[in-house]
Image (cartoon, grey):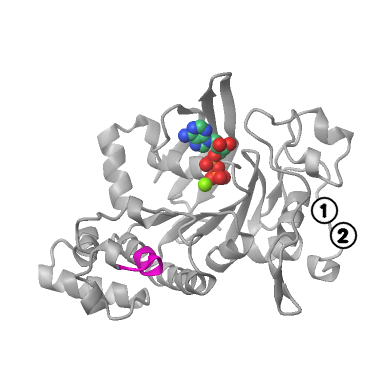
Amino acid sequence: MTTHKAPLLEIDALTIDVMTAHGPRRAVDGVSLVLHGGDTLGIVGESGSGKSLTLRAIMGLLPKGVIQTSGRIVLRGVDVATMTRRQRRAVCGKDIAMVFQDPMSSLNPVMRVGPQIVDGLTARRHLSYRDRRTRAIELMSRMGIPDPDRRFHAFPHQLSGGIRQRVMIASAMACEAALMLCDEPTTALDVTIQDQILRLLAELCEQSGTSLLYVTHDLAVASQVCASINVMYGGQLMESGPVADVFRSPLHPYTLGLLGAMPRVEHGKRRLVPIGGAAPALGELPAGCPFAPRCILAEEACERGRIDWRDMTDGRGVRCVRPLTDAIAPVEDQR
Ligand SMILES: Nc1ncnc2c1ncn2[C@@H]1O[C@H](COP(=O)(O)OP(=O)(O)O)[C@@H](O)[C@H]1O
Ligand SMILES: [Mg+2]
């Protein structure tokens, strides 16, 4: 893509440490991402790989005792480190909407849900309340919320988990922000509802040109809403590329493992094939590739030291000494 406009979001060599009783431990290790307007990008990896901290760092929302030690986060060409707290909050409020896993953490429990969505319609302040209300109900209806006129007046606790989640996504969409950051917003939901929400989210993003940075442990979910995938492990990016390419021919053995761990229907039953071993705990990361201890293809070079990122063709990249190539059969054939 040859655009001379500054990217919407640029994360450059982001490093985040968690302070522990035994000193600082690296949780995010040199993560770089670029997101242009309209891009939909997934960050995928097992629990503990550093996805949520990466996302929170963008908003300046790192928890206490967790520190960004190096790297830059650049929004529309401006390094957020040079912004005052106030400027940052203004930019984040206007340009970025965030959706979390737990809707109760971002919905006001003592306020009816409709007015909360109306409040989110910040770009439409010039409209009358009546018009904004109509627009909020329209959004609820597009989110597949049945009977939105009636539910407009409900309090969050009066709604089911699935409806609440949709209300939260609707209020995030209401902002018409340029970028939506999602942290596993559908993980707690029933698979059917999850599918429905993901479809709506993808559709709404496409219609309004909203960019998406979507964090999930589930590669299948990311593939539903994102055009490209970034695979994280042990705080590092392992692989990135367009969804279809990553699925067709993963370059990193970890990605191949994740694909193998995707639930699939066999003889009418959902079956999960996991990767052997467990994800490393903070502070137990090896000197070399963090995945080496679990990698069936690991060799001596993998354990010697940090593995360099390699840019490959067609917008792909991988951090592996010996990336998988076409010599390895496509995943479908191995099932
Ligand atoms: N507030 C915190 N205090 C201490 N450790 C944390 C905190 N938040 C995250 N961590 C640790 O940092 C690592 C990355 O966490 P996180 O970004 O939440 O992973 P993910 O979202 O991929 O599951 C994990 O090992 C986690 O235990
Ligand atoms: Mg997380």
Q: Name the residue: 75% across, 41% down.
A: 291
- Quarter of the image for residue 131 reads bottom left
Residue furthest to the front: 158
Q: Is residue 166 visible?
A: yes
* Tag of residue 200: none
Residue under circle 2? 328
Taking the magenta stretch, the answer to whether it contains residue 217 is: no
Residue under circle 1? 324
* Residue 277 placement (x, y as % from top left): 76, 45
Q: Which residues are magenta?
A: 159-166
Q: Residues within 10 Å of mark 2 (few under 14, many from 20)?
A: few
Mark 1 lies on a secondary structure that is loop
Mark 2 lies on a secondary structure that is loop
Q: Name the residue: 39% across, 65% down.
A: 161
Q: Is mark 1 within 8 Å of ligand 1?
A: no
Q: Is residue 187 above or below residue 142?
A: above
* Residue 327 placement (x, y as % from top left): 89, 59
Q: Nearer the viewer, residue 314 or 232?
A: 232
> Which quadrant would the C terminus be assigned to in this image?
bottom right
The rendered magenta stretch, by its main secondary structure, is classed as: helix
Are the residues at dot 1 and dot 2 in contact (C-beta closer than 8 Å)? yes
Q: Is residue 313 above or below residue 267?
A: above
Q: Is residue 307 above or below residue 141?
A: above
Q: Relative to residue 117, is residue 209 drawn left or right?
A: right
* Residue 72 placement (x, y as % from top left): 48, 34
Q: Name the residue: 56% across, 22% down.
A: 24
Q: Amino acid at mark 2?
A: Ile
- Quarter of the image for residue 326 reads bottom right
Q: Amino acid at mark 1?
A: Leu
Q: Is residue 6 visible?
A: no
> Which quadrant would the N terminus be assigned to in this image?
bottom right
Q: Relative to residue 332, is residue 103 drawn left or right?
A: left
